[in-house]
Amino acid sequence: MTDLQMGLIGLGGAAVIGVLGYNKWQEHKHRKLAEQLLNVRQADVLLDESPPGGASADDYAGVDGGAEAADPGAGGGARSAGTGHERVEPLLRVEPAQDDGAYEASAPFAEDSARVAPAFLSPREAPVAGRSASPQAVPRRPDDAPANAGGQAAPLYLLSPMIDYIAAIEVAEPAAAYRIREGQRAALVRIGKAVNWIGYNEDSREWEPILEDSDNAYRHIRAGLQLVDRKGPVRDGDLSVFHVALLDLATELMGVAELPLREPALQAAAQLDEFCAGVDIQIGVNVISQGQVFPGTKLRALAESAGMVIDADGRFARCDDEGNVLYVLINQETKGFSSESMRTMTTHGVTFLLDVPRVANGDRVLTQMVELARRFAEALHGALVDDNRRPLSESAIEPIRRQVVQYQTAMAHRQLPAGGPLALRLFS
């Protein structure tokens, strides 16, 4: 054996030893990182907090605790035309006077209204064995997440376990906001539901949205995939993409991620969508001409005198003091309203529209809208009618007003008050 061969054998042996040593060093480094993250004993306000209203995680075992289970396979479709985003016209039907249990008896979503957060969003009680086998998807102790100054919880309008599938990422070194948002953008852009990000600002000791152009960096990160909107519940495929993307992001940031179980999330999404479909109605009141068309200039004068303004969708919108839309006025013909066209346009009818889940105190807003519609009808010499062109009287409005109260009461019992931040996200 020549000296060259001996030298090559020696170099090969040294390379093998070097690789083994490097692997041991990497293993030690990652173990220390995981121990450093998991030894922080603090309370997670989003994922480890007991559900509001005194309910325990046992009450939500398997999401619905044995109540009527929604078919998880139904998670891919939008709401049917008959139940979702339904336009309810006056004189649709006469409802009996509401009693304490009316909303439970009349709606398809009769379930325990005290339930607020499904069990899959409370990892404190969730079985560890069912979690992902990925090294980054480690079970989190009840007090791993940052405590908030003064006991303040993260605002629910940012992320809420009631409507979001929330992933928690903890990193040892603060990660820049742009790096967090850009890390898995290519994967997350394929998801058909909103994804919201928040991080814990250690200077202000508060949770805040993670903005792409922010200079802040975060060690405690939460990402939430919205489970339901007006298109229907989240699909299994979208949930899988989100799950994998957040695990990959944790790896990129040299951190650890924990995500809830997927199957209970899909079941909860189906149940929440069923509830939303049961209360998702719009109420329209029509003003139609009785021979002569309505001139655009007069329509604009009447609308602006009532405090309505033209929005980007070509509608006149009436808003409250905080800028929330109360009701809108739309053209019954195909052309929308615009400042430029109002001088020359004419129409045979307009419709006042109230989006019930997106408006607080819907019964009072309905009264205001109907009164304004009557003034329009008088000023334009038109008629106030329903969609069947039947005259609309106060006695015909009253059953609809009771129905609005009924549906909004159901939303309040579900901890999703009409016109609130969560309702605005769900019914969008």
Image (tube, rainbow, N blue to C red):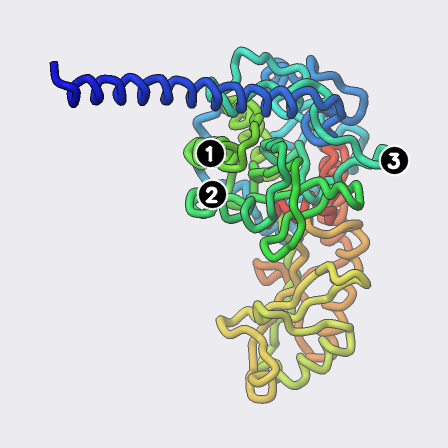
3D distance between C-alphas at marks 2 and 1:
8 Å
Instruction: List x then y, in percent, for residue 410.
Output: 73, 35
Tag 3 residue: 150
Near mark 2 (Cα within 10 A), the count class, few <14, some 14-19 or many ≥20, is some
Q: Decide if residue 404 is in sight here.
A: yes
- Dot 1 or dot 3, earlier in sequence: 3
Query: Could you say which disc has been placed on residue 248 in the image?
Result: 1
Q: Is residue 75 visible?
A: no
The residue sitting at 58% across, 78% down in the picture is: 338
Mark 1 lies on a secondary structure that is helix
Kindly identify which residue carries mark 2: 184
Residue 339 location, x and y as percent?
A: 61, 82
Give me the residue at 12% from left, 18% from top: 2
Front residue of this view, candidates 355 and 286: 355
**Amino acid type, label 3:** Gly
Going from N to C along the chain, the mark reached first, 2 or 1, is 2
Residue type at mark 2: give it.
Answer: Gln
Quarter residue 6 falls in: top left
Is residue 208 depicted above or below 71 in this figure? below
**At label 1, which amino acid type do we have?**
Asp
* Residue at the (74%, 21%) spot, across then down: 41
User: Split into 4 quadrants, where in the image is the N terminus?
Assistant: top left
Q: Are marks 2 and 1 in contact (CB under 8 Å)?
A: yes
- Residue 222 image offset from top left, x and y in percent: 63, 37
In the image, 392: left or right of 1? right
In primary-sequence order, the first of circles 3 and 2 is 3
Quarter-wise, where is residue 228 in the image?
top right
Query: How far apart, in angstroms, are the residues tagged by discs 1 and 3?
Result: 33 Å
**Label annotation for residue 400:** none
Disc 3 element: helix
Q: Residue furthest bottom?
A: 344
The answer to which of 287 and 189 lies nearer the viewer is 189
